[in-house]
């Protein structure tokens, strides 16, 4: 508020002594385009008549429509400004008639009307201009997905591009003169930052006679921005590779199955013969163990009889 009051006081003094005469003229470039994330320039220059030659600038103020605060203010030799706003010429002084404003790291919200007010010791004038902020779309990417469940449809081409503003369009071409956009469906989604993400799908039928399809990004003004091409000759090679790959796999799998079966059979045979040999050994040792038990019993009985005879004698 203090700055505004001081500016008003200066305005009263200068207006009384000079007023808005034809001596001072603020000329601005009315239409300006800035790129999102880059520097944007709002061009304004003060022109003076012969009578006002050598005029000295007392006040320069910049405001944006809808914003009550000054974006930039030069007054009484002092400068106050909001972040991202500064004079286009770093070495500016009150004799410099270039009062252009530089906006750094431009945002989408910077779009709109701006007003420049200049006071000199010979008079004052106002200038107004408009800034449009745009963002360039990325180079599109194209992918193809096959449709194995539908007889008439070969598959779908999908094109994507993002990071642009304002809302653009994706269009399909098979040749420079043949357009297929009407056969496609496009979706535009706006991110939290305000930029757009574009996606378009083009359904292709079997027997398509075109080897290449191009997806082209157009901006809101209808200008061609970026494009990408999908080559179906590469897709045909991929299909052939898949076929050969399946054949190669079958060639590899069959011998592996046969060899595996033989190995399993040999292992089962070895296990069978091993069990048979164990059973034979058990049967051959059983009689020997029985005879040994009988002999031991007889020896014990004989010893017992000799003991009894000795005691009786």
Image (tube, rainbow, N blue to C red):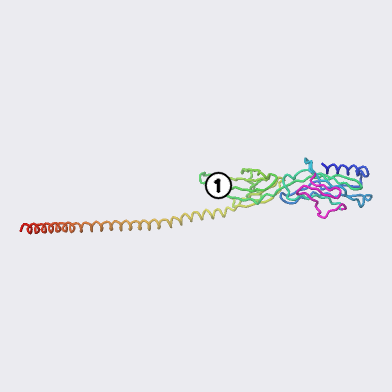
Q: Residue at x 60, y 47 (%)?
A: 158
Residue 44 painted magenta: no
Residue 311's x, y, as percent? Answer: 7, 57
Residue, far right: 51
For label 1, the SS is strand
Picture quadrant of residue 306: bottom left
| Quadrant in the picture for the N terminus | top right
From the viewer's side, name the closer residue of 121 and 5.
Answer: 5
- In this rendering, position of residue 81 left or right of residue 270: right
The segment highlighted magenta reads 70-95
- Residue 255 lies left or right of residue 33; in this view the side is left
The relative height of residue 297 versus residue 129 in the rendered view (above or below) is below
Q: Position of residue 65 (x, y in %)?
A: 78, 41
Q: Nearer the viewer, residue 72 or 250?
A: 72
Q: Residue at x 88, y 48 (%)?
A: 58
Disc 1 designates what residue? Answer: 155
Is residue 140 rendered to the left or right of residue 295?
right
Q: Residue at x 85, y 42 (%)?
A: 5
Image quadrant occupied by the C terminus: bottom left
Residue 292 x/y as whole percent: 16, 59
Q: Is residue 72 magenta?
A: yes
Tell me if residue 260 comes above or below residue 200 in the rendering: below
């Amino acid at each position: 508020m203090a700055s505004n009051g001081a500016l008003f006081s200066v305005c009263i003094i200068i207006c009384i002594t000079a007023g808005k005469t034809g001596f001072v003229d603020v000329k601005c470039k009315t239409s300006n385009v800035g790129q999102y994330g880059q520097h944007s320039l709002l061009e304004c220059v003060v022109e003076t008549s012969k009578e006002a030659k050598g005029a000295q600038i007392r006040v320069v103020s910049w405001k944006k429509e809808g914003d009550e605060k000054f974006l930039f203010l030069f007054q009484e030799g002092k400068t106050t400004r909001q972040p991202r706003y500064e004079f286009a010429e770093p070495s500016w002084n009150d004799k410099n008639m270039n009062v252009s404003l530089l906006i750094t790291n431009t945002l989408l919200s910077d779009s709109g009307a701006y007003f420049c007010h200049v006071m000199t010791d010979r008079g004052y004038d106002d200038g107004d201009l408009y800034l449009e902020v745009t963002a360039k779309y990325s180079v599109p990417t194209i992918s193809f997905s096959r449709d194995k469940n539908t007889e008439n449809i070969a598959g779908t081409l999908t094109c994507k591009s993002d990071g642009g503003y304002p809302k653009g369009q994706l269009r399909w071409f098979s040749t420079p003169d043949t357009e297929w956009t009407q056969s496609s469906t496009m979706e535009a989604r706006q991110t939290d930052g305000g930029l757009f993400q574009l996606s378009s799908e083009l359904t292709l039928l079997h027997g398509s006679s075109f080897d290449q399809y191009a997806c082209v990004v157009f901006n809101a003004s209808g200008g061609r921005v970026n494009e990408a091409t999908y080559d179906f000759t590469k897709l045909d090679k991929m299909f052939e590779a898949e076929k050969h790959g399946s054949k190669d796999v079958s060639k590899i799998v069959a011998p592996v199955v046969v060899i595996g079966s033989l190995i399993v059979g040999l292992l089962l045979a070895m296990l069978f013969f091993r069990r048979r040999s164990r059973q034979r050994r058990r049967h051959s040792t059983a009689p020997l163990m029985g005879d040994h038990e009988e002999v031991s019993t007889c020896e014990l009985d004989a010893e017992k009889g000799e003991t009894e005879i000795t005691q009786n004698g």
